[in-house]
Amino acid sequence: MKYLFYLIVLCFIFSCQDKKKSNSTPRTISEISKELIENPNDTVLLKLRKQLFLQKNNFEAAIIDHKKIISFDSTNIDLLFELANIQYQVALEGKNEYYKKSLNTLSKNEFLNKNHFSSLLLRSELNYIFGNYKESLSDINKVLKIDPYLAKAYFYKALNYKDLGLIEKAISNFQTTIEQDPKFIKAYEQLGFLYSELNNSLAELYFNNAVLLDSSNIKMLYNKGKYLQDVGKFNEAEKCYKSILKIDAFNEFANYNLGYLKYIKSDYELAADYFSDALYTNPKYSNAFFSRGMCFKKLKRYHEASKDFIKTLEIDSSFFSAKEELNLIKEKLKK
């Protein structure tokens, strides 16, 4: 009898453990969907399935579930913000119409939105995207009243001023962005662009700082290289482009610019090789065909030059220089 009691206890313990394991096993989207057929208004299941959709980056499916959740609590500002944020993520994936949907979501229930920090911040970004500078700046100022140290708010404030042509204010706010967050790489980039447009050598300092923050960032390396190229520091520019090729061997823009730098140094063979690498990545790169054609012309390889000028015009029939060079080559080939 005593042993029977222990056996019953052990069976109970193991059954509980098995139940615990089964309960802790994550359910699939398919399983949750089956449960929702029987309980379509179960917000716990809807939230669970939405999270699984988000984990799989299936944002549009997540939106459908989230809208259903909102229908049970339509004045919940956190839920409305989450919907706008998911719509924004869809837009970032390339479906641009979702930028407007996100803005529309945040423009509803104005009374609820006016002091909701996250909603104000996202709406300011969206209004900037649509060129609604007055509305964007208004929301940013509200955000900064809540958090006067938020780097992202100063960054978008600066972008608004930049687009409005208020360059001094833009520079000031980009600098404030960096003061609040010294690792805000896009602020260094923007300051580099602005000082470059002003022909101010401080541009190099900011492009340098951007690269120092992330030496594997191809965009920042390109920005620095292009600036150095534009101011005539060709050897330093070349180093930047070669750093890009260590990360992305067939980067079309780095290869093209290296081709250009070799061309102006009269190293036409190597220049042609770089232009060829750019064309390997982008076979529709009309400038690369034209530039390689110019290399072949300098090397007196006129048939190859002719082919590249013809290809240039096939891609871009309005490429006037290619027309001129092709006519000149045809004259040479007649002789």
Image (cartoon, rainbow, N blue to C red):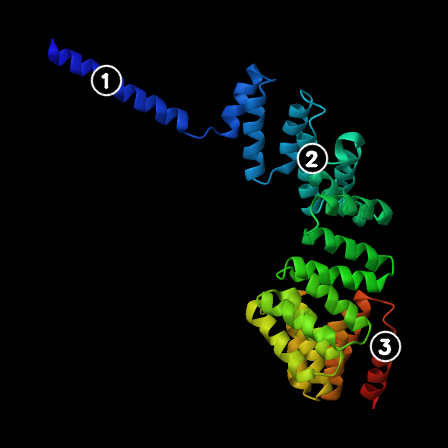
Question: Can I make out residue 101 in this image?
Answer: yes
The image position of residue 19, as x and y in percent, is 35, 21
Foreground mark, 1 or 3? 1
Name the side, left or right, on which 164 lies relative to 255. Answer: right
Residue beneath label 2, please?
Answer: 81
Name which residue type carries label 2: Phe
Res 303 quadrant in image: bottom right
Q: Are marks 2 and 3 in contact (CB under 8 Å)?
A: no
Secondary structure under tag 2 reads helix
Q: Which mark is residue 237?
A: none
As helix, strand or loop, the secondary structure at mark 3 comes to helix
Residue type marked 3:
Ser
Q: CA distance from mark 1 to mark 3?
A: 88 Å
Residue 318 in which image quadrant: bottom right
Q: Which residue is mark 1?
A: 11
Coordinates of residue 232 in the picture (x, y in percent)? 74, 83
For the view shown, which residue lies furthest in the bottom direction? Answer: 335
